[in-house]
Amino acid sequence: MILIVRTAIVTLALVLAAGQAAAQAPAPSPAERLKSTRECARCDLNRADLRALALPGARMERVRLRDSSLKEADLSGADLRGADLRDTEFENASLKGANLAGADLRNTDMERGDLGGANLTEANLYQAKLKRSSLAGADLTQVNVSWANLDRVDFTDARLRGADLLSAKLKRAVLAGADLSGAKLDDADLRLANLSGANLREAKGLTRDQLAGACGNAATRLPDGFTIRICSAQTETNP
């Protein structure tokens, strides 16, 4: 009987010790939680180093990722709606098909990134750097890309309805088939841009001087009275 009681006491002590140890174990950091579960909605990940991480389909709506590094990361199909991504580095990262609606991307570096088919409606990319990135088929309705560097960006078939492109750099950008109806193009640099099949019919702030440096084709839709030179075969294949 005494042996049984002693055994029970020892077992209880071990259970209590294990429970206490578990309670004292530190909770995983937001970065660790994201890496293990691919979920971190509303997390604080400011100044995080997440370079080259593979997080396709991650759920990160309204995450705070300001001044962080996601160079060469795979965030394809990720949910980043309303995220704070200011000053974050995304060079060579994949955000293909990602949902960035309403995200704050001011001063973000996304050079050579893949945002094909991404949802960027009403996102703020003021002064963002996207040189040589792909935004083919992306939805940029009502987006703010004023003063952004968009040189050589591929906007093929992208939707830029109502977008703010004030003073944006679009040198050698490919806007073939893009919808720019209602877009604000005041002082945008369109030198050597390919506007073949693009819809600029209701674009705002567009001048003849801007179009003089660009090219298009017979399918390019322009405001009444505007003309554009026809792109050469070399321009269409190697803008």
Image: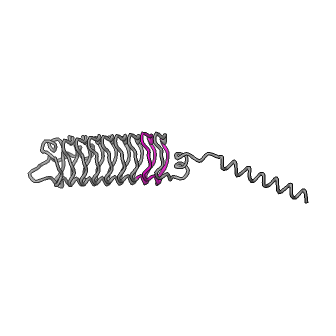
Q: Is residue 38 magenta?
A: no
Q: Residue at x 33, y 50 (%)?
A: 123
The outermost residue toward the bottom is 1
- Please state if 30 lies on the left or on the right of 167 as rendered: right
Relative image position of residue 109 (x, y in whole percent) = 37, 40
Residue toward you, 165 or 12: 12
For the N terminus, give its image quadrant.
bottom right
Q: Residue at x 16, y 43 (%)?
A: 210
The outermost residue toward the left is 225
Relative image position of residue 174 (x, y in whole percent) = 26, 47
* Chain part drawn in magenta: 51-80
Applied colour scheme: one colour
**Residue 188 visible in the displayed image:** yes
Q: Residue at x 11, y 49 (%)?
A: 227
Q: In the displayed structure, would residue 129 be above or below residue 216?
A: above
Relative image position of residue 190 (x, y in whole percent) = 21, 42
